[in-house]
């Protein structure tokens, strides 16, 4: 994520902001699926998946290559065009199992009870927008389906990795779990696993991810 303090915070979530960011450079992301997505879903039975904030589509393409019918949504049409092109490049067997849709996650409501997996990787919204988004995503999971929310942990604010100077957009897995009705959800993972990345100065740094993985009972 870029430095939010250089922009009006509301602009950071707009289509204009992200279209400009994607248009001004080559690939923004690595092209690899998110580590936590792979860890948490590799053994699940494929079905219908929704990836929220899909960017250039690496997670959606990985899901499709593993047997899922995967829909990627993002605010940026530029990112979605790149994602669709990457899927086409991967071949018809994968492209035919991907769908792309432009949405504003601050107001968009996915269809209720339609997905076997809903994944949101590093969608860093402030409250109350974050909790409202997580409730809408939870409602999109069908009984027996999985919800996977991964984000930047608050401890990352003290790491030299260029996180935005906006503490409220960081969150813990426990905060995500708190929006789920315990009668309807079984929490499988609620944790802050560590991983190593390279900071802007080339140093290896340990950071933590907030990881919430839950399955809908009914």
Image (spheres, rainbow, N blue to C red):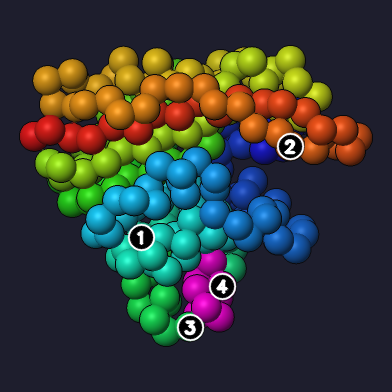
Judged from the image, the secondary structure of the residue bearing numbered disc 4 is: helix
* Comes first in the chain, label 2 or label 4: 4
Q: Nearer the viewer, residue 139 or 41?
A: 41
* Tag shown at residue 91: 3
Span shown in magenta: 83-90
Question: Measuring 18% from the left and 18% from the top, which residue is drawn there?
Answer: 182
Decide if residue 77 is in sight here: no
Instruction: Indicate which disc, 1 or 4, sits on the residue closer to the N terminus.
Output: 1
Q: In this figure, which residue is indicated by the disc labeled 4? A: 86
* Mark 2 vs 3, N-terminal side: 3
Residue found at x 49% / y 56%: 59
Kindly indicate whether the residue at mark 4 contacts the one at mark 3 (C-beta within 8 angstroms).
no
Separation (CA) of disc 3 from disc 4: 9 Å
In this image, 63 relative to 195: left or right?
A: left
Q: Main secondary structure of the magenta part?
A: helix
Taking the image as shown, residue 194 lies to the left or right of residue 183, namely right
- Near mark 3 (Cα within 10 A), the count class, few <14, some 14-19 or many ≥20, is few
Q: Residue furthest left?
A: 218
Residue 84 shown in magenta: yes
Q: Which residue carries the number 1 mark?
A: 71
Q: Earlier in the sequence, mark 3 or mark 1?
A: 1
**Vertically, is 128 above or below 91?**
above
Q: Which mark is residue 197?
A: 2
Foreground pick, 205 / 184: 205
Residue 135 x/y as whole percent: 28, 29
């Amino acid at each position: 994520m870029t430095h939010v303090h250089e922009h009006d915070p509301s602009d950071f979530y707009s289509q204009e902001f992200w279209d400009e960011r994607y248009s001004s450079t080559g690939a923004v992301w690595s092209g690899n699926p998110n580590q936590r997505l792979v860890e948490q879903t590799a053994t699940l039975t494929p079905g219908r998946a929704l990836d929220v904030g899909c960017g250039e589509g690496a997670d959606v393409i990985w899901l499709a290559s593993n047997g899922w019918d995967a829909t990627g949504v993002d605010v940026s049409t530029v990112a979605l065009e790149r994602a669709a092109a990457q899927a086409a490049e991967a071949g018809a067997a994968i492209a035919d199992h991907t769908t792309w849709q432009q949405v504003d996650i601050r107001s968009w409501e996915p269809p209720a009870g339609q997905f076997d997996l809903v994944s949101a990787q590093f969608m860093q919204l402030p409250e109350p927008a974050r909790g409202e988004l997580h409730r809408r995503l939870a409602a999109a999971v069908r009984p027996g389906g999985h919800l996977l929310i991964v984000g930047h942990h608050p401890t990352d604010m003290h790491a030299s990795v260029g996180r935005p100077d906006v503490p409220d957009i960081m969150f813990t897995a426990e905060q995500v779990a708190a929006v789920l009705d315990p009668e309807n959800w079984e929490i499988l993972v609620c944790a802050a696993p560590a991983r190593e990345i390279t900071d802007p100065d080339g140093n290896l740094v340990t950071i933590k991810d907030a990881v919430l993985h839950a399955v809908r009972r009914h």
